[in-house]
Image: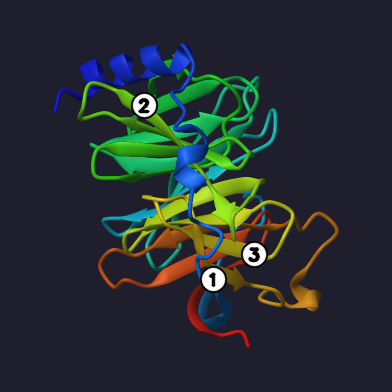
Amino acid sequence: MNVMRCYWVAIGIAALGLVALGQAAAAGTADVQVTKQRAVAVESRPMERRNFTQGLYIFDSELYVSSGHYGQSAVRVYSWPSMDLIREAALPKEVFAEGLTLLANRLWVLTWREGQLLMINPATLEILTTGKISGEGWGITHNGSTLWLSNGSSRLHSIDLGNGGKTAALDVTLQGKPLGKLNELEWINGKIWANVWLTDTIVVIDPETGAVTSEITAQGLLAPEEREANTDVLNGIAQDAETGAIWITGKRWPKIFRIELVDAN
């Protein structure tokens, strides 16, 4: 795949306005049974509190983090699982970094209100090029050659870099009703996991229908005594491809947790 060519095709199309699937994607989702689960911490590792975590990704014994806020946005890379900082780079002060993923040996970092998608060299953290997307950028993940993006609404957008930059949209529903505030994303075992902003909830989304198939509560994961005045919400999901383990954290959290799921009932 010619990454640079496909990148510009995809972003050029996205700038014109992403193609929507309309309400068809939500048809028949009202009767989908939703599993209620609870995240239980079975292991934790230290996390730098300075990370206003927006994106989280594990690959090849490294953990990639995008950290937000104007004038403070950065990408940091830690050795995994020892969590030693091995490289970092500040992003332009005029951008607010959001989600992050790694595809085709490139980091893809969204910005919030600037409508930008940054393509970054993961080895040097140099910004190679900047593309435009329509609307805000929140979370990003991928499956194969397809990038999936969230913008804070109930609609996810996709850009297939391996298919000429083909774009589409998926309406996400919970028992037939639109579910908004979808934030950080991670592709796990054929489904899209998404943080629901301002909540302790993660939802699992069927990428074919947009229906939520599971709600996961992470309430109480971070102990009250570990919270400080600027500790913010749950945000950040990553799967270790080597072990299959799922790790989650939050904005300015001092820990990243390996979780297992149990029945919430």
Q: Quadrant of residue 145?
A: top left
Report, in whole angstroms, how far the alpha carbon at label 2 lies from the one at label 1: 28 Å
- 78 displayed left or right of 255: left
Residue type at mark 3? Thr
- Is residue 91 in view from this perspective? yes
Disc nearest the viewer among 2 and 1: 1
State the residue at coordinates (34%, 65%).
Answer: 240
Where residue 45 appears, as percent x and y from the top left, is 52, 72
* Residue 225 marker: none
**Picture layout, residue 103 above or below residue 250:** above
Q: In which quarter of the image is residue 40?
A: bottom right
* Extreme residue in the left direction: 1
Report, in whole angstroms, how far the alpha carbon at label 3 lies from the one at label 1: 13 Å
Residue type at mark 2? Thr
Q: Quadrant of residue 190?
A: bottom left
Name the element at disc 1: loop
Q: Which of marks 2 and 1 is nearer the N terminus?
A: 1
Disc nearest the viewer among 2 and 3: 2
State the residue at coordinates (16%, 23%).
Answer: 2
Q: Mark 1 points at which residue?
A: 34
Q: Earlier in the sequence, mark 2 or mark 3?
A: 2
Name the element at disc 2: strand
Where residue 95 appears, as percent x and y from the top left, is 62, 24
- 217 displayed left or right of 169: right
Q: Mark 2 points at which residue?
A: 167
Q: Give yes or no for contact between labels 2 and 3 (Cβ–Cβ under 8 Å).
A: no
**Mark 2 surroundings within 10 Å by alpha-carbon count, few (fewer than 14), some (14 through 19), many (20 or more):** many
- Is residue 88 in view from this perspective? no
Q: Mark 3 points at which residue?
A: 201
